[in-house]
Image: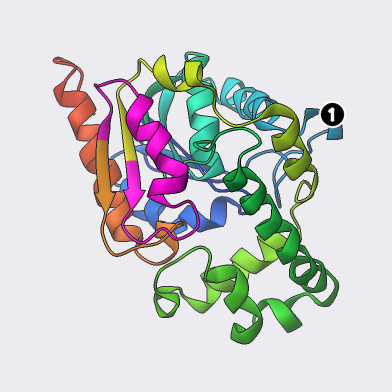
Amino acid sequence: MNRAGSGEPVLLLHGYTLSHHSWHRVVDNLSRDYDVLAMTMPGHWGGPRLRLRDVGVRGIADGVERELDKLGWETCHIAGSSLGGEIGFELERRGRARSLAAINPSGGWKHFSYNEFRLGLVFVAQFPLAAAARVFGDRLATREIFQRPIIRNCVSDMAAVTPDDAANTIRAVSRCPIYLPMQLAYLRDGPLTDQDIRRVTAPTSLMLSEFDTFLTRDKCMQRLIDELPGHVEEVTLSGVGHIPMLENPEIVADALRAHLVGVADRQPGRAL
């Protein structure tokens, strides 16, 4: 994990198969004003171990809660990307979120839908690349030609991703213990339910990338847009893809800062 700064607690949760490394430049930015923790979620490279029977959104959220309890963070501001956004909704449901910023969150599709199977097949088809990188290590993880099929699902402009960030992305994907079990967990548990979506009460921003070709607006986000409560603010992250902090951490940090300031403005007497 990566923790820096002081002030109101802000928890950053990464996407499926990634790690806290994807947030490092956002941490550097936000830590000037906040106590920022980028956590590697249970079941991911470098994160707490996750028993096979606990693989799934609820089991990962249980593990995140245990880490929050160790820190003494009864509540915190939560920003989650992709799977981290879906975990954020689950933590909000449990009362752990002072506010939530969901960045291209997963779980917006319908259970047993074409889109659910399509996304699962993308990860299954990508698994041989991840397995090869696990076997051959940095001989493959640091090669741009090998990185391309995985990174292009994450960003709009591959040239904007630094070599270190690209290599750490491949390292995380190749070493994710729940890579395949999570696909089975989604089929078992399903995505966010209508109740999960409609009952959100914490101040929430739904942040959607302009050029997300992985979880597209029409196929994977429209249900969230239609069913989230009216107080949820939709924010567009211009010019970026599915994991925007890999290619433009500044736009992500600026959006999160605006979200946090907006939460403070709606809570008079409580400065962030």
Relative to 263, residue 149 above or below: below
Residue that mark 1 sits on: 53
Quarter the C terminus occupies:
top left
Splitting the image into 4 quarters, where does residue 122 fall? bottom right
For residue 82, say whether it is visible: yes
Residue at x 73%, y 35% (from the top left corner): 187
The location of residue 178, given as percent across then percent down, is: 77, 46
Residue at x 54%, y 28% (from the top left corner): 192
Q: Amino acid at mark 1?
A: Arg
Query: Which one is nearer the viewer's eye here, 212 or 29?
Result: 212
The location of residue 138, given as percent across then percent down, is: 73, 78
Relative to 34, residue 73 above or below: above
The location of residue 68, given as percent across then percent down, is: 56, 25
The residue at the far front in this view is 114
Splitting the image into 4 quarters, where does residue 168 fall? bottom right
The coloring applied to the image is rainbow
Query: Which one is nearer the viewer's eye here, 233 or 100?
Result: 233
Magenta region, residue range? 207-233
Residue at x 74%, y 42% (from the top left corner): 182
Query: Which one is nearer the viewer's eye here, 201 or 67?
Result: 201
Query: Which one is nearer the viewer's eye here, 8 or 226?
Result: 226
For residue 40, say whether it is visible: no
- In this picture, residue 113 sits left or right of residue 36: right
Relative to 153, residue 228 above or below: above
- In this picture, residue 52 sits left or right of residue 112: right
- Is residue 162 rendered magenta in the image? no
